[in-house]
Amino acid sequence: MEMSKSLRYIIAVCGGEFIKFITAISIPSNSEYMRKFFFSIRMSQSQGTSTVKRKRQDSSPAQTPEQVLLSLIKSKGDMGIWIRDMKRETNLPENLVTKAVKSLLVQKLIKEVVNIQSKGRKHYMAAEFEPSKELTGGTWYVGGNLDMAFISVLKDSCLKIIRKMKVATLEGISDFFKRNKIITVECTTPQIAEILRSMVLDNEIIEVKSTGLGDYSSIPIGTVCYRCATGIGLGQGPKIGAMASTPCGVCPMISQCTPDGIISPKTCVYFTKWLDFDF
Amino acid sequence: MITQHGLKLGINLISSYFGDIVAKVCECLLRKGTLSLGQIVRLTELSRENVKNSLLVLIQHNCVQAFTIQQEGGFQEETKIITQYMVLFDIIIHHMRFPKFLAIVSEDLGKECEEIFEGLLQHGRLSVNQILERHKQTSNQSEGNSQEAVQENFSRLVNARYVERCPAHQPFLAPLTEEETAAKKQGAKSAKTRRQMAEASETLEQRALAEAAPMESIRFLVESFAETKVDEQNSEEDPHSVTVGEKRKQGDLDLDIEDGTRKKKKEVLWRANFEEFVRHLRHKACIANVRTRFDDGAGIVLNAMLEATRSTETKVKMECSVPLSMNTIFEEVMKSEAGRSMTLERVRAALVQLGCHLPAIGIDETYSIDLKNIIELAQNEEVESIVLKRYGREAYRIFRLLSKAGHLLETDKISDTTFVDKKDASKILYKLWKDDYLHMEKIATYGGKQSQFLLWKVNKKSLWEHVLDEMYHAGLNLRLRTAYEQEQEKEILQIPREKLVGELAKRYKRLRKVRIVLESSLMKLDDAIMLFHDF
Ligand code: SF4
């Protein structure tokens, strides 16, 4: 049995290839001993190395590559999986994977989705899942691109509502959307909150706390609300400061500009353009 | 701290007002800090005479303050008294604001006062007699503008605090006493010692300025004309000769430049009170800001409050306005024409807009406005508008997000909140970072798929300094371009006006317009410089 032990070792290390190899060797039928010996190897291979080579087992003829891939893709849920990762995790050759994926697609068991992190990669997901936020980039993304049209419709609507209401809370604006069915697509309150936040950043509206006086009388004191500013400068977008109204203030070359250098105020084209008056 | 381009702008100003030699001395002081005459001579390689005269010019124009210190001699050596010269960067830069200061005086006190004040700006320091003399020469005698009228106007200038007594010519800084030095070492806990410690930790320059400043009680005191003429009032001419007392022995001092000013020393010298103008412009900036942010009402109320408390402000950079009761505020508002139409309710609403909390029933309540906050908001706006024009709308949104957040944010989070595509967001962030507008930190995580995150933030302190430096740079460029345009059209400027016809007239007209645009831009830009440096 010494021999059988060392053989077992080889099998454990080399895996199935060795089995194929020795099975292929013609075994003398009259040798009872040899038959027993090989039988014992086969047995030990199926028991002893089963943990080591589980994946190989999964792809045993009992399961087609398609089935293997499908269960793998399903196991990834709403995250889906990149085609290269499928190969890596199943150890299936490339052509088999491609073929299987194609057929799964035809059967509509899986679908291709865009991964915002790396748009070029082929990413697949089981048909019953919807791509997660990490993949799509969130509610504002359509097909991996920011849905600018939708966003600007929402922004415009919000601005109109706030103008109309003078001062409005988030809930007020959201209700207005619902009651008046301004947009056909559903838009949640958190989504509107996001829109408002970006409008504040754009300085199109300002965020204030209700004082409970005047325009705010219907809003409890301290509640955050939004308004177009009554001031001269606000609510009309950002105002241009003193620095930004001179050529140097907006000049991308300012750090290279010196009194007598190649880039200098004397020869500066921005200045020349600025001071090019018609007479 | 003086930034690199601030320094260059300062040198440019001095060189165009007082010539290259003075500018060289000034540059030496700006770059090296406080120095003695000998050191300046060595560093500039100018003749002693040249340096001396340059210093005189700079002192006359308030750009340099001299002071003397006692230097301990080594073993068996005598203690020496040496004179040091420190440069006053802020006042150098104030020189380009003179048109603004003049406009303030003219608007507030009228033409006659403006003329007197203009003389003070031109000459740096003048005595009342010199002012009278100058007036005799420049004014039209037939107008019969009596000397009394000039004195009257001069008093108005002083009472409005636009003019003040000059600081002492050359104060003596006594070495710190044993007690002060000890206090510094021990770090004792009593309030008194702590104050002494604070004093001890002041720089030499700060001490010199404090020592030179005229006492508050006489800073705006005009003695009667007769007195000035007859009595040389020695005791008042230099208040510090009293306080410094015996330590100061005139004979011992190395009064390098005393000769030039000795004659004048007999009389009290006056100069523009730059501090008051900065305060005035600061108030104006605050009022303009709340006016655009809220409405005229808020502007009127703030204006009234600041106007009423102007003389009680203890320093220029007041964090909050001096507290006033509701009654006083209302009275003050009623004083202005615009304010007369406001109701008490309206005034109260304006105070709320300005950030005051009004109790339902207020008795003996006083209100004060957070000026520091207004200034900070104005600074934010200025920087944001640079970002908008230089980097675009999306960068503007991203920058505002980071500036408001005040802490680190991750790229994806920034992209989500600002509705900027993730790839674009990264590009914009990178560009802003490269130009020193943002601070970036990398965080590597192990185990997860994405191994590196980039976090971004606006570091206001360093960014503000960077922006201020860019502003000085832009100001310098505007000045250089103005000089260049003048130089280009030199010949036209030499031709008498009536001979300028056809093409020449066109060129002349163009040059005029160019100058107006460049100079008015510089004045506007200077508002922003003050916002970041002086307010
Ligand atoms: S002078 Fe011209 S090149 Fe130089 S910073 Fe100004 S705009 Fe830019």
Image (spheres, rainbow, N blue to C red):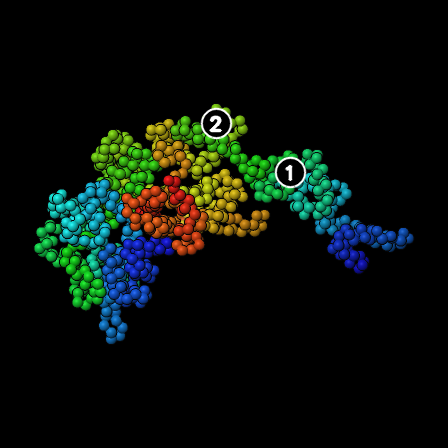
Q: Is residue B183 above or below residue A88?
A: below
Image coords of residue B499 (percent x, y): 29, 45
How many numbered marks appear? 2
Q: Earlier in the sequence, mark 1 or mark 2?
A: 1
Q: Residue at x 42, y 51 (%)?
A: A267
| Displayed quadrant of residue B261 | bottom left
| Displayed quadrant of residue B231 | bottom left
Quick one: quadrant of the N terminus of chain B? bottom left
In the picture provided, is B100 more to the left or to the right than B503?
left
| Displayed quadrant of residue A276 | top left
Image coords of residue B520 (percent x, y): 33, 44
- Of helix, strand and loop, which one carries label 2? helix
Chain letter, disc 2 residue: A
Answer few, some or many: residues within 10 Å of disc 1's Cα (few below 14, many 20 plus, some between 14 and 19): some
Answer few, some or many: residues within 10 Å of disc 2's Cα (few below 14, many 20 plus, some between 14 and 19): many
Indicate the amino acid at tag 2.
Phe
Check disc 1 and report the residue beneath it. A112
- Of helix, strand and loop, which one carries label 1? strand
Image coords of residue B348 (percent x, y): 28, 33
Residue most extreme to the right: A30
Out of B157 and B129, give the one closest to the viewer. B129
Check disc 2 and report the residue beneath it. A177
Q: Residue at x 32, y 59 (%)?
A: B27
Indicate the amino acid at tag 1.
Glu
Do the dots labelled 1 and 2 sit on one chain?
A: yes
Q: Is residue B524 visible?
A: no
| Whole-number angstrom distance, CA of label 1 to CA of label 2 | 34 Å
Chain letter, disc 1 residue: A
Residue most extreme to the top: A180
Image coords of residue B212 (percent x, y): 22, 57
Q: Is residue A11 visible?
A: yes
**Dot label at residue B512:** none
